[in-house]
Amino acid sequence: MDRFQELSAFVAVVEAGGFSAAARRIGESQSVISKAVGALEKRLGVQLFKRSTRSVVLTDHGWQYYERTKPLLEEMEQADGELMSSTLDISGLVRIAASSTFGRLHVLPVVPELLSLYPKLKLDLNLSDSVQDLLAENIDLAIRVSPIRSPDAVARRVTTTSLVCVGSRRYFEQHGMPATPEDLVNHNCIIFNGIENWTFAGPDGKFSVRVSGNLSSNTVESLLYAVQAGIGIGMFYRASLVGDLRSPDIVTILDEFVAETRDVSLIWPNRKFISARVRKVTDFFATALARRI
């Protein structure tokens, strides 16, 4: 039995959750699947699954091997498909992660175009303001507007977005408008994810002001609602305020002191092989997001 058959059987068992389900999935007998996985374990000299009469569970070695070999198998299958078709026919599932607000404003609006280009493509969108572990969550592509701290990820910078400090006209009519960043200590500032030090730039370079307020949240949507309701002042990525900045009720302040920008980046796990469909989706978003932001 060749390595490709062993890998195919191994991945099928992982994704189907058992040997009999894997056999049905790829149209082989259960004994063939079992022999293929057994041959693979013997060749590698490690146990890939913990087997019992009720379940089949990956070992730590099994998880490591799956994460490395799954992209290889996808690449081989994609290469076969490309050669068998006269035109490149992208198909299959791509899992995408983005923050909830950014995803609503910039990812979802271009999804119809992407699916129109590749009708056989399937997308699984994970929109959350928490930063997902790409490998643990099995994410193929993440779209982030934040510093990239993961050593296990590869980043492709698409564009940049600036920070902007805003409040509602109602709030400023009641509490006055700060003339300098230092004035923020006397205002109610809405805190995102516990970040109480806001960075500004002056003639002498960058400096920070420690702000405080009666509301904090881990989602941009709730902070934006609070600003619109006149609760306080917030600091946002400009890309998160599409449309809102055109509202007469929202006022930007301290523009001459807000100089920081953030990269908008496409992130994927640091794997040697990336499937053709993930590359195509990555290229699409690189173009589409640069055009929108």
Image (cartoon, helix red, strand yellow):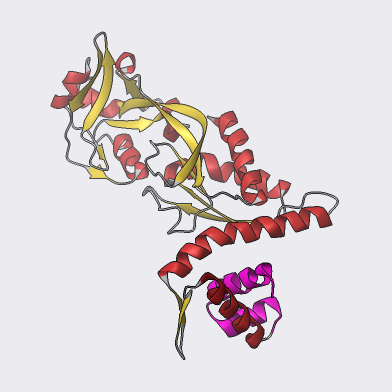
Q: Residue at x 36, y 28 (%)?
A: 249
Q: What residue is shown at x 49% (from left), y 58% (from top)? A: 138
In depth, the one of 248 and 208 nearer the eye is 208
Q: Looking at the image, which residue sits at the far top?
A: 203
Left or right position of 40 against 135: right
- Look at the picture and state if 218 lies above or below 70: above
Residue 293 against residue 270 in the figure, above or below = above
Which one is nearer the viewer's eye here, 110 or 52? 52
Q: Position of residue 134 (x, y in %)?
A: 45, 53
Q: Nearer the viewer, residue 252 or 65?
A: 65
What secondary structure prevails in the magenta region? helix
For the N terminus, the quadrant is bottom right
* Image position, residue 132 (x, y; %): 40, 52
- Tell me which corner region of the image, top left, top right, bottom left or bottom right, holds residue 211: top left
Asked whether residue 121 appears in the rendered view, the answer is no
Measuring 32% from the left and 13% from the top, which residue is drawn there? 256
Residue lying furthest right:
86
Q: Is residue 50 above or below residue 235?
A: below
Rendering quarter of residue 73: bottom right
| Magenta stretch: includes residue 168 | no
82 vs 58, left or right, is right
Magenta residues, start to end: 1-28
Q: Residue 87: where, in percent of width, then height? A: 82, 49
